[in-house]
Image (cartoon, rainbow, N blue to C red):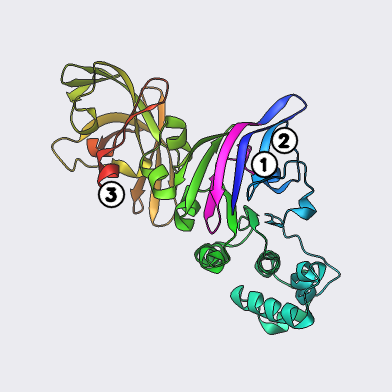
Amino acid sequence: MSLILEGVSKSVNGQPHIHATDLELRSGTMNVLLGPTSSGKTSLMRLMAGLDAPNTGKVIWDGKDVTGMRVQDRGVAMVYQQFINYPSMTVYENIASPMRLLRKSKDQIDSAVKKAAELMKLAPELLTRKPLELSGGQQQRCALARALVKEAGLVLLDEPLANLDYKLREELRAEIPKIFEEAGSIFVYATTEPEEALLLGGNTATMWEGRITQFGETPVVYRQPVNATTARVFSDPPMNFLKVRVSGDRLHFGDGQSAPASDAFAGLAEGNYLAGFRPNHLEMAKKGPSALEFSTKLQVTEITGSETFIHLDHQGDSWVGLIHGVKVLEIGAMMDVFLDPKHVYIFAEDGTSVAPASYATAA
């Protein structure tokens, strides 16, 4: 079983929401759509489901062109960020409703509902209540249970955990892959959070302005982005960038600094490049002889409890560093920060990847 998008695009009032897209998803896989708000995740899901018709291209389901087929006839289940349950029905009837439409027997329905409720940690006494009598997390679990019993070939999860509290999000992030892994369906999960994509595993498609910038196994996309846009999307906070020039065996930075061309820079042809590095790789102390040193100005600090985000200005470039521990620092002060070259990604001036960071290829 497979879902294939062939040159699928969508425009609304002349504005492109999805540019021509090719994508193939296989049964039994978890596929994450990762991108910021308005990057096209929901629009692409609606095309997959048949809720919207593409302007160009085809949607192929299990070898059959279903581009013009109604969503009701496709065997699709969709769970949204907002809790969508039938308020007049009990939780039991909400979960059972897809099976009743499929004319399943009473025993089949009862068995499936109880199993799904147990998987979603909905206690038996909750099944007799109405959705509005439940907490927000329980309502979303009800919606997920309904998607589970539908036995759909394609399950679309559009930021389903975004409105839940932190603890419940963490629990369900760990549970969802386990719950669905034996179903044999194709699962598509939309999120704005890189951490969530890494926790879910499977495959990830990074999205930016209606385009898929890269698709593949999640760890590979994270460690070896094919361009600067993918690297920016798959980093929270976004990846920092620095213009560099390679001349001979030296690196030259915009502030008049230079350093030996080692690690990812070694062997590069002379010319201009874009160096990228993730916030957690900036250090406040020099930890090796080859570490690159930069003089920056501290703009803002954000203390999360166990970590501190430092917002820096480096010659007009805005950088973010993620420092372990609580740091009380003077806003506006000059601050030296350090970067190990093994954590640096190299991109061409147009953003195309030239060399991944050496630490990433060794992982």
- Discs 1, 2 touching: Cβ within 8 Å: yes
Q: Quadrant of residue 143?
A: bottom right
For the residues carrying marks 1 and 3, which lies nearer the camera in this image?
1
Q: Earlier in the sequence, mark 1 or mark 2?
A: 2
Residue 210 showing in the rendered view: no
Image coordinates of residue 243 in percent, x first then y, are 34, 22
| Residue at 20% from the left image edge and 33% from the top image edge | 263
In percent of width and height, residue 7 lies at 62, 32
What's under tag 1, amino acid-wise?
Val
Check residue 290 for magenta coloring: no
For label 2, the crowd category at 10 Å Cα-Cα, with few meaning under 14, some 14 to 19 and many 20 or more, is many
- Residue 147, compared with residue 269, is above or below; it is below
Label 3 Cα crowd, 10 Å radius (few <14 / some 14-19 / many 20+): few
> What residue is rendered at 67% in x and 37% in y?
58
Residue toward you, 191 or 280: 191
Report the amino acid beneath label 3. Ala
Mark 1: give few (<14), some (14-19) or many (20+) Cα within 10 Å.
many
- Image quadrant assignment for residue 352: top left
Which quadrant of the figure contains the N terminus? bottom right
Q: Point out the frontmost of discs 2 and 3.
A: 2
Circles 2 and 3 in contact, beta carbons < 8 Å: no
At label 2, which amino acid type do we have? Pro
In the image, taking residue 302 as reference, residue 264 lies left or right, namely left
Residue for badge 3 = 363
Q: Which residue is mark 1?
A: 59
Q: Distance of mark 1 from mark 2, alpha carbons? A: 9 Å
- The magenta stretch is 18-43
Return the residue at label 2.
54
SS class, disc 1: strand
